[in-house]
Every structure is written in C-alpha cells, then in structure tokens.
Image (spheres, grey):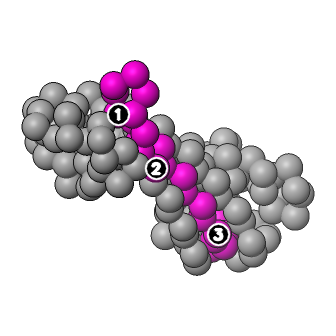
C-alpha cells in the first residue's frame, strides 16, 4: 500500500497488486551505472481528496504520475542514504555490474564499496498503471466534517 497527497489536500492510497523490477548495469567510459525499471499495477483503495473525479481519465493519469514521483522519490532517498551513511552495497549493484560486464568488474571490484558504490549513479524509472478504482464518490468523512 502506498499513499500520496492530493493536489487540493487529503490523501489517496494505491494498493499494489503486482510489481516487476528490472535492474541493468553498464560501464560507460570506465564508470559504472545502474538502471532500474519498475512497473507497478495497482488499485486505488482509499480516497480522502477534495474534488477529485476518479471517473475522468485525466485524473487517473495525474494520480499515476503522482505515484510515479512518490515511489521514485522513496527509492532514490533509500539508495542515497545507504550510499552515504553506510557505504555497503546491500542492493547487489556490484553483482549486476559483474553480470553485465565481467571484464570491467575485475577492475572495479577492488574499490567497489569505498570508491564506486558511494558515487554510483542509479537511474530509476517508475511506471504505475491504475487498473481499478475503489471509492469513486466523496468520502463520508467529508460529510462528517460539515
């Protein structure tokens, strides 16, 4: 379950039904890089937003983008924290580089945690697809507040 803020206040929740993550490594001009592609299918489960028409395709696309940004931000912050605070490759990025370019890995592995992992560029692409909607009417909480 993932939550994000609505543009006009309130929150909306996404129930993640299926996710698929592909990670690829590459070495460009002697510098390693990781590309992560995340595809998520989910359902809108809880809506506490004001004036949000879930039956409008533009609203669904806007929500998908909000969830894309939110999930990408969480992933980037987690990776950055581990790189800077701990400097230990708990994600297995070194193994991804090793599989993609064994020859380059022979040079990189000796200084991986200290030198390369801490500054490793990780490019994240998230694609959320909302399949179904939960509540499509205003929340009963709105009526209670009035």
Q: Residue at x 64, y 69 (%)?
A: 41
Disc 3 versus disc 2: nearer the observer: 2
First along the sequence among labels 2 and 1: 2
**Viewer can see residue 76:** yes
- Counting other residues with Cα less than 10 Å from the Cα at mark 3, is it few (<14), some (14-19), or many (20 or more)? some
* Image spot of residue 107 (x, y percent): 20, 34
Relative height, residue 77 to residue 130 (above, below) = above
Q: Is residue 40 magenta?
A: yes
* Image spot of residue 79 (x, y percent): 30, 44
Q: Residue at x 69, y 53 (%)?
A: 64
Relative height, residue 124 to residue 96 (above, below) = above
Q: Which residues are magenta?
A: 24-47
Measure how far apart labels 3 and 2 are at the Cα level: 21 Å
Residue 113 vs residue 44: left or right?
left
- Counting other residues with Cα less than 10 Å from the Cα at mark 2, is it few (<14), some (14-19), or many (20 or more)? some
> What residue did someone put label 1 on?
32
> What residue did someone put label 2 on?
24
Q: Main secondary structure of the magenta part?
A: strand
Q: Residue at x 30, y 41 (%)?
A: 103
Q: Element at badge 2?
A: strand
* Image spot of residue 18 (x, y percent): 57, 75
Residue 94 vs residue 64: left or right?
left
* Image spot of residue 90 (x, y percent): 20, 54
Question: Which sits in the foreground, 93 or 57?
Answer: 93
Q: Is residue 51 magenta?
A: no
Question: Which sits in the foreground, 6 or 2?
Answer: 2
Q: Element at badge 1?
A: strand
């Amino acid at each position: 379950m993932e939550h994000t803020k609505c543009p006009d206040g309130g929150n909306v929740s996404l129930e993640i039904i299926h996710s698929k993550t592909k990670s690829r490594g590459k070495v460009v001009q002697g510098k390693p890089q990781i590309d992560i592609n995340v595809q998520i299918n989910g359902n809108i489960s809880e809506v506490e937003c004001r004036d949000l028409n879930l039956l409008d395709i533009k609203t669904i696309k806007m929500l998908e983008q909000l969830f894309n940004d939110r999930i990408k931000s969480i992933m980037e912050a987690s990776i950055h924290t581990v790189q800077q605070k701990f400097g230990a490759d708990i994600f297995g990025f070194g193994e991804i580089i090793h599989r993609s370019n064994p020859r380059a890995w022979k040079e990189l592995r000796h200084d991986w945690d200290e030198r390369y992992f801490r500054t490793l560029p990780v490019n994240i692409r998230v694609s959320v697809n909302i399949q179904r909607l939960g509540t499509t009417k205003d929340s009963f909480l709105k009526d209670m507040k009035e």
